Image (cartoon, rainbow, N blue to C red):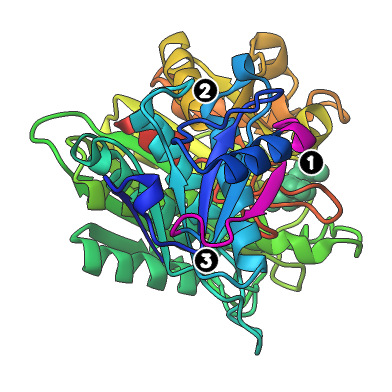
Amino acid sequence: MMINAENTQPLKKKTKALCFFVAEKSEEPFGLPKIDAKLLAAVKQSAKETKGKRGSIHIIHTHGLIPAEKIILAGLGHIHKITHETVRVSSGNVAKKIRDLGMGEFSIVLPDKFPIKVDSAASAIVEGVSLSQYSFDKYKKEKTPALQNISILVSDQAKISHHVSKARTVSESVNFARSIANLPPNECAPAHMAGFAKSLAAKNKLKCAVLSKNELRQKGFGGITAVGQGSKNEPKMIILEYNGKKDEAPTVLVGKAVTFDTGGISIKPAEKMDEMKFDKCGGCTVLGVMKAVSELKLPVNVIGIIPSVENMPGGESYRPGDIIKMYGGSTAEIHNTDAEGRLILSDALSYGVKTYKPKAILDFATLTGACIVALGANVAGLVSNNNGIVSKVKKSSDRTGEEVWQLPLNDDYMDMIKSDNADIKNVGTGRAAGAITAAAFLANAVGTVPWAHFDIAGTAWIQTGSKEKSYNPKGATGFGVRLVVDYLS
Ligand code: BES
Ligand code: MN
Ligand code: ZN
C-alpha cells in the first residue's frame, strides 16, 4: 500500500473514489470545489441525510460528471469537537469501506481551511488508513486484499510530505509490533523474540545483545530465571541500542514479553487463556519503537530491554512460597506465580538503571487484570515517580490519541507489598489496588530515576467481545508505539 500527498485539484483527479470530510449538520463538505449543479444537489442531500455524524459514510455516484467515479462523504461529528483522533478514526472507516467494496484505491481531500492544522491532520489520515488496513492473515488461506494507492489531495504538497512520510514510518512500525504480538505461542517463544530483535538490528543498524538462561542465572537475574525455569523454552533478555546523539544519557524502554502466561503453578482458568499469547505485547511495543526511531533517525539515544519468558507449570517451575533474589538486590517472596510480569520487569529495570544511567526509564506491560477493571479497554494505566515525565507523557498521549490515566503511588501502597519473610512480596494485600501494588513492586527497582510505567493490559489487544476502533483491527493494537515515538521526538 502506498499513501502520498499530492497537489492535484480534486476535480481533475481520476480515481475510483474522491473522499471529502464533512462536519455535523453542515451541507458543505470541507474543500468541496464548484461542481455541476446536479451533483452538488446530490452531495448536499447526502450530507443532510447522514447529518455528518461521527463515523458516518455516504457514497454518491458521479455519473461521469467529474473524473472520479464516486464521491464519498465521511462524517466528522460536531465541528467544535473535531480532533486528530476524529480524523484518524474517520479515515480508518473510509479505508475499510473502500476495501470492503473491492476498490483498490481512493483519494481524500484535505483543504487548507480545515478545523485542525493541515500537516498534523495529514499525519492522522495516514495513521488511520495504514493502521486500519493491517490484518493478521499469516495462517489463513484466504488473504485480505490490500489497498494499492491512496492520495491525499492538498494545496501545498511540499509542506506536508515530510509529515506524511513520518506518519507512514510510524504506522509501519506499529504494524510490525502487531505482527509479532499476534503470533501464536507455539511460533513465538523467547528465542523467537530474540531472533526478531536480531534481524531488526541487522536491518536497521542497531546494536543487539541477547542474554541466555545461563548468563541470566550467573549475573543474578533472579526474577527472569525463576519465572522462566518452568518452561523448556528458555528465557532470554534482549537488549537493543540506538545511538542518534553523541554524549547524552539515553532513555531506556523496558517491555514485558511473556510469550505465554498460563499463570504457572498458580494456574489460570481455561476461559480466554489463549489470549495470554498477548502477554508479550509490551516487548513488541519496544521493538516497534526501536524500528521507528532508527528509521526516522531521531537525534536521541534509546535503549530497548525486553525480558522474555514463558510462564508454565511443571516439575521445574518456581512455586508460591519461594524466596528469590532480584537483580537489584532485594529478596522477593512469591505469593502467586501468576504475578510474574513484575518479577521479570524488576530485573530488567534494575539492569537498565545500573548499566545505562538513563535520563528516563519507561516500561510497558500487560501487567494486571486489575488495570482493566479500573480503566477498561481504551485507557492505559500510568504510574510514575516524576511529574515532569508525566506531563510529557500526557502531551504525547493527547497528540496520538493513545490514552493514559495516572494512578497514585504513595508509601501506603509500598507498604502493601512488604513481606513477613523477605524484603517484598509479589502480590499486594488481597485484590485492593492491584494495578498499583504491581507498580509498587517496579518502583522498588528504579529508585529515583525518572520513571513511567504503562499498564497496557486493557489496551494491548482487542479483547474478545469488545468493540474495535476503525484503525485497530482485531488482535494486537501496537499500543504505545505512536505515543513513545512522539515522546522521543
Ligand atoms: N498477564 C497477566 C495480566 C493480564 C490478565 C493482562 C488478563 C491482560 C488480561 C498478569 O501476569 C497476571 O496474571 N496478573 C495477575 C496478578 C495477580 C495474581 C496479583 C492478575 O492480574 O490477576
Ligand atoms: Mn500472570
Ligand atoms: Zn502476565
Q: Circle 1 — which element?
A: helix
Q: Nearer the viewer, residue 424 or 65?
A: 65
Q: Quadrant of residue 403?
A: top right
Q: Ligand 1: does it lie within 8 Å of the C-beta at label 1?
A: yes
Disc 3 + disc 2, Cβ < 8 Å: no
The single residue placed furthest to the left in the displayed view is: 246
Query: For mark 1, does the 10 Å Cα neighbourhood hold few (<14), some (14 to 19), or many (20 or more) residues?
Result: some
The quadrant of the rendering that contains the C terminus is top left
Q: Earlier in the sequence, mark 2 or mark 1?
A: 1
Q: Is residue 205 left or right of residue 200?
A: left
Give amino acid for label 2. Answer: Asp
Q: Circle 2 — which element?
A: helix
Q: Earlier in the sequence, mark 1 or mark 3?
A: 3
Q: Is residue 214 visible from the viewing direction of this image?
A: yes
* 3D distance between C-alphas at marks 1 and 3: 22 Å
Residue with the mark numbered 2: 398
Q: Earlier in the sequence, mark 3 or mark 2?
A: 3
Question: Magenta segment range?
Answer: 48-67
**Res. 180 mark:** 3
Asked whether 479 falls inside the magenta stretch, the response is no
Query: For mark 3, does the 10 Å Cα neighbourhood hold few (<14), some (14 to 19), or many (20 or more) residues?
Result: many
**Res. 7 mark:** none
Give amino acid for label 1. Answer: Gly
Residue with the mark numbered 1: 369
Disc 2 + disc 1, Cβ < 8 Å: no
- Vertical comparison of 393 with 181: above or below: above
